Amino acid sequence: AQYGKCAVTGVILWIDEIHCHHKKPVSQGGTDEYKNLVIVHEDVHRLIHATKQETITAYLSKLNLNKSQLQKLNKLRIMADNPAI
């Protein structure tokens, strides 16, 4: 359904860039059902789960997300029990 595009950036992903992200983590009762999964770029996935400020800053600088992309990222971060950026 995503046509090989990152759910946050909208960029078409190469096979080695694709990461499957659980919207609701399995550790919090999430499942492997299609509705709980989304594909994202590897760097976006690392940013969703990042907790250290230096890591967050580095990936934000690397990805250069616009306002809409940052909102999508923050939605996934909140669902993963991380604070919005």
Image (tube, rainbow, N blue to C red):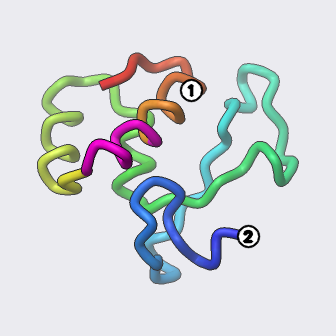
Q: Is residue 71 above or below residue 66?
A: above
Mark 2, residue position: 1
Q: Position of residue 29 (x, y in %)?
A: 81, 23
Q: Is residue 12 above or below residue 73?
A: below
Q: Residues within 10 Å of mark 2 (few under 14, many from 20)?
A: few
Q: Earlier in the sequence, mark 2 or mark 1?
A: 2
Q: Name the residue at the front extreme.
A: 68
Q: Which residues are magenta?
A: 66-72
Q: Is residue 13 left or right of residue 25?
A: left
Q: Is residue 13 left or right of residue 46?
A: right
Q: Residue at the location (65% across, 69% down)?
A: 2
Quarter of the rendering occupied by the N terminus: bottom right
Mark 1, residue position: 80
Quarter of the rendering occupied by the C terminus: top left
Q: Position of residue 63 (x, y in %)?
A: 22, 56
Type of amino acid under label 1: Ala
Alpha carbon of mark 2 to alpha carbon of mark 1: how far?
A: 22 Å
Q: Determine whether the residue tagged by mark 1 lies in a helix, strand or loop.
A: loop
Q: Which of the pair 78/21 is nearer the observer?
A: 78
